[in-house]
Amino acid sequence: AKPRYTLEEAEGDASARLFVVHNPGDPRKRLASSYHDPAIDRAFAEVLERWRPDVVHFNYFLWGLSLGMVDACRAARVP
C-alpha cells in the first residue's frame, strides 16, 4: 500500500541490514523499465549513503531493480 519507490529499512537480525523499496509489478511496464529505472537508482544511492557497505554483490537485476545500481556503486566508490 506504500507509494512506488518508497524506501524503508526493515527490522532484521543483527547480522544484516534489510532495505525494502516498494516497486510493485505493473503489466503495462515496458521491457526497458525492467532493467533501467532511474527512480530505483536514486533509492539505491540513498541505501549506499545510509549504509556505507564495504562491497556490493549483484545477482539479479530484472523486473524491479536497475543496471544503474552498478553506476551508483561506482559513484559512491563501493566495489
Image (tube, rainbow, N blue to C red):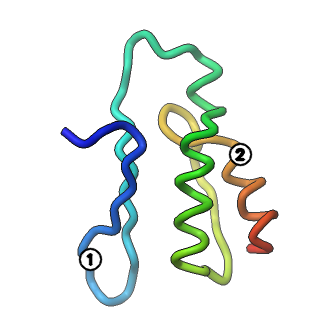
Q: Is residue 45 visible?
A: yes
Q: Where 28 sits versus 76, above or below?
A: above
Describe the element under mark 2 as helix, strand or loop.
helix
Going from the N terminus, do you reach mark 2 or mark 1 first?
1
Give the class, few, some or many, for how many residues have Cα within 10 Å of label 2's Cα (few <14, many ≥20): many
Can you give x and y, in whole percent of width and height, for residue 42 in the image?
60, 51
Q: Quadrant of the N terminus?
A: top left
Q: Relative to 36, does residue 7 appear above or below in the rendering?
A: below
**Image quadrant where residue 66 sits:** top right
Tell whether 20 sits left or right of 64: left
Q: Position of residue 39 (x, y in %)?
A: 56, 41
SS label for mark 1 = loop
What residue is drawn where x is 63% and y is 38%? 38
The quarter of the picture where residue 31 lies is: top right
Label 2 to label 1: alpha-carbon separation? 26 Å
Question: As drawn, is 21 to the left or to the right of 50?
Answer: left
- Which quarter of the rendered picture does the C terminus lie within? bottom right
Q: Residue at x 36, y 57 (%)?
A: 20
- Between disc 2 and disc 1, the foreground one is 2
Residue labelled with disc 2: 68
Which amino acid type is shown beneath numbered disc 2? Answer: Gly
Residue 79, visible in the rendered structure: no
How far from the left and from the top, in percent, is residue 8? 34, 61
**Res 32 → quadrant:** top right
According to the image, label 1 marks what residue?
Answer: 12
> Please, which residue is most extreme toward the bottom here?
14
Left/right of residue 19 with respect to residue 77 in the rendered view: left
